[in-house]
Each structure stands twice: as C-alpha cells, then as structure tokens.
Amino acid sequence: RRVVAGIGAAALASLVPGRLRAAAIKPDDASALLVIDVQNCFLPGGSLAVKDGEQVVPIINRIAKSFANVVITQDWHTPGHISFASVHSGKKPFETIDLAYGKQVLWPDHCVQGTDGAALSKDLAIPQAELIIRKGFHKDVDSYSAFTEADGKTTTGLAAYLKARKVKRVFVAGLATDFCVAWTALDARKAGFETSVVEDACRGIDTQGSLAKAWADMAKAGVKRIQSSDIA
Ligand code: VGL
Ligand code: ZN
C-alpha cells in the first residue's frame, strides 16, 4: 500500500517543490514583448556568439503570436565603439575597464551599424512587431538596456513610447540574459512596468559570474522569472 493515499499522481507531482506550475499567463493589450538583440553577431558564427543562442528563435517566434505589442531591439554600435576591446590598447575582450560612467566589460567588435552582423536573425518571424529600437549608437557610451544608456541618464524613449501606448506589463526575451536582457528588465522595473523574463527564450554569455549576478539582481528588483510554457 502507498504511503500517500487518496491523491492522484498528477496532484502529487504538483506538490513537489519547484514543480509548481504557474497559472497560464494571457498577454493582453497592456502587455508587450521585448525581443532583445536577436542579431547575427550573437548567433553561431557571429563575433560575440552566445552559446545556443539560436535556440531562442523558435521559442520567441512561438510566444510572439500571443502578443499584440512587440518591440524588437538591435545593438547598433558605431565603428570603434568604446565597448570594443580593439580600441583600448593592451586590452582583450572580456576584460573590464573603468569609464566615466562606471565599469565597462570590453567586447569583440560586434553589431556595427549597417553590417550583416548587426542584422536581425533572418529566422525571426514576428511580422506584427511595431517598433525596432536601436541602442548603443553613441560612440562613447554603451547601452545594454533598451531603456537607458549606460550613463544612467540618456533614454532611448522606450519607456515613454510604452506608456503612451498604455502598456503596463513587459515580457523580456532574447540575448543575452546577463547583459541586454537583464539590464532591460531592471530598467523596466525602474520605469514602473510589471516585468517578466522568459528564461527559456533567453541565453546568457556568463563571464565572471555575470549570469548568477543578473538573476540575483533581477529577483531583488521584483522581476518575475517565467518559462515560455507559462504563456498561453
Ligand atoms: C550585449 C554585450 C555587448 C547583449 C550587447 O545584447 O547582451 N552583450 N553588447
Ligand atoms: Zn554591444
């Protein structure tokens, strides 16, 4: 005889910690999906390829069908951008430097304006997307976030756009979890949006503990961590 009687296997499974399924989320007209930096440079063969980055594309295409409002971002750097290791003598990619606005991770050259590497993945299929927002186009300032540049004050206009469209909730997906996705989600909270990151619709770079730190910072800021299967 089983120890636990009178409870079905499915109900029992739902009691196992970590197995609790969130109630299905149905995006409404006040919800927007932010699709972050699904660009060739961050995909296999790209100059700053994120491991398994291509796996987010079909997931994003699927969940995007549930959203009336979709905003896509593009990292969009000048040649010789300050975030490129190649412009700092003696520095290599993934090292850091101190800039006027704070600590900056240095990257391989990537997402240079107008190049094929900066183009959105040709497999991204979100025809109803309403806005493509470009960021990181000031040569001396980086911008991981889709809302505010790394100087902490120059805005991209995205918060004002979303508020004008009466958006209250944002869902963030794309590349990379620990940089542009996380910074976008944190700024979304600062701007007063209910914010969820769709974990399996993102992949991370994970340099010097950045992925764990990003999830900790997001949890502290009240960003919800959800899965694509939670979205109806
Ligand atoms: C990103 C590093 C440099 C990102 C952009 O999209 O997460 N990461 N530029
Ligand atoms: Zn960049």
Image: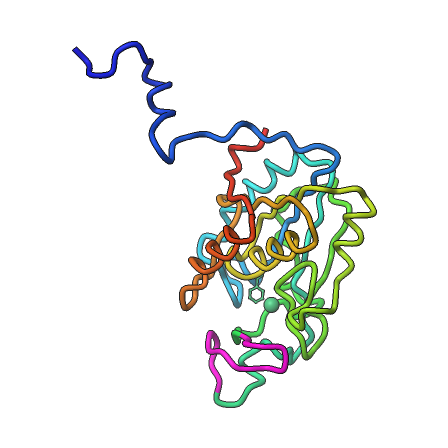
Taking the magenta stretch, the answer to whether it contains residue 99 is yes
Name the residue rendered at 65%, 42% in the picture. Answer: 125
Residue 183, above or below 87: above
Instruction: Locate ligand 2 by image quadrant.
Output: bottom right
Q: Is 160 placed left or right of 191 in the picture? A: right
Numbered circles on residues, count: 0
Q: Is 11 placed left or right of 158 in the picture? A: left
Tell me where residue 157 appears, x and y as whole percent.
78, 59
> Which residue is most to the right?
164
> Which residue is most to the left?
1
**Quarter that holds the N terminus:** top left
Tell me where residue 211 appears, x and y as whole percent.
45, 59
Tell me where residue 158 appears, x and y as whole percent.
75, 55
Q: Which residues are magenta?
A: 91-104
Residue 66, above or below 185: above
Taking the magenta stretch, the answer to whether it contains residue 84 is no
Tell me where residue 27 appears, x and y as whole percent.
66, 33
Nearest the camera: 98 or 38?
Answer: 98
**Quarter that holds the C terminus:** top right
Name the residue rendered at 64%, 78% in the picture. Answer: 81
> Which residue is most to the bottom?
89
Name the residue rendered at 53%, 73% in the picture. Answer: 107
Q: Residue 4 is drawn in which quadrant?
A: top left
Residue 141, above or below 145: below
Q: Is 6 placed left or right of 180 in the picture? A: left
The colour scheme used here is: rainbow
Q: Is 1 placed left or right of 188 in the picture? A: left
